[in-house]
Image (cartoon, helix red, strand yellow):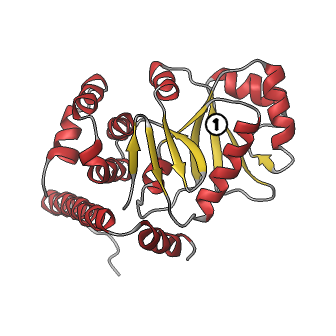
Amino acid sequence: MELAFSKNKISFKKELSPLDRFVLKFVKMLKKHKIDYVIISGYIAILFGRSRETEDVDFFIEEMPFSKFQEFWNDLVKEFDCLNAADAKDAYENYLKEKLAIRFALKNTFIPNCEIKFPKTKYNNYSLINKVEVLLNSNKLNTSEIELQIAFKLKLGSEKDFEDARHLYKVFKEHLDIDLLKSHIKELMVQKEAERILWKNY
Amino acid sequence: MEKLLKLTKSDLRELEEEKKRNFEQRLQFIDAYAAWLKKTPNKVWSRQQNKLSSR
């Protein structure tokens, strides 16, 4: 695996998967509307080689006034269907403002889909502020800081999440800020999980 | 025909141990796979990953 690292930036080239192409299509719309975003969770492990599939890709997008969201929505629904909200007003008021996610899939499909939320917690905001820029072939993507992603996967706690955490830890081990990772682990109170899933040799 | 499993505490303990062993083996596989990924060109691993996702 050839990865190039610089401050808050990871560059690499690979054969794009259908999931990568789907994510890049959605990201292109966010960029077009100048919406700040970060991709979190399972897709990051998959982007960096994990051998599993996912049905959804999780995003935090910056909180914005309804007028801006409506413009984004109107453009987005030309290519994507919203799977759980009826219209822009419903999505904004009954989902995003209520800390709930809305899901978009390509027209006439259900999976994969992008699940988007406004950042509502300290963890959400940290993810958006401290994001990492990934240059994938010639495409830019914002992903969550890898150290935070590993710690958060330990917090989520399913076997799949633990496996994602160990995958990211093993792949990025030589490039991680271990003090930062330990600090996130401590703050999220997942020291026991880290002991078993990250530090222990099997 | 008897359909009940009639598991004892000992049987359940064995199942828990098996679950733990399976998970540890998954982690071992992830270690081996990550080690392989790190020494394999992007073009090669991403092609294999794509084959998996397009099955």
Of all residues, the one furthest to the bottom in this rendering is B1
Residue name at image x 40 percent, y 34 percent = A7
Quarter of the image holding residue A190? Answer: top left
Residue name at image x 38 percent, y 44 percent = A5
Return the x and y of residue A91 as percentages of the image width and height: 76, 31
- The quarter of the rendered structure image containing the N terminus of chain A is bottom left
Return the x and y of residue B34 as percentages of the image width and height: 29, 61
A82 on left or right of B47: right
A179 on left or right of A131: left
- The quarter of the rendered structure image containing the C terminus of chain A is bottom left
Q: What residue sits right under mark 1 in the picture?
A: A116
Q: Is residue A102 above or below residue A198?
A: above
A26 on left or right of B2: right
Return the x and y of residue B20 as percentages of the image width and height: 20, 57
Number of on-image labels: 1
Q: Is residue A106 above or below residue B48?
A: above
Residue name at image x 25 percent, y 25 percent = A183
Tell me the amino acid under the disc marked 1: Ile
Return the x and y of residue B39 as percentages of the image width and height: 29, 67
Mark 1 is surrounded, within 10 Å at the Cα level, by few (under 14), some (14 to 19) or many (20 or more) other residues, namely: many
For this rendering, which residue is in front, A180 or A118?
A180
Q: Is residue A179 above or below residue B32?
A: above
For this rendering, which residue is in front, A63 or A101?
A63
Residue name at image x 24 percent, y 59 percent = B27
* Callout 1: chain: A
Tag 1 secondary structure: strand
Q: Is residue A163 above or below residue B35?
A: above
For this rendering, which residue is in front, B16 or A1?
A1
Quarter of the image holding residue A37? Answer: top right
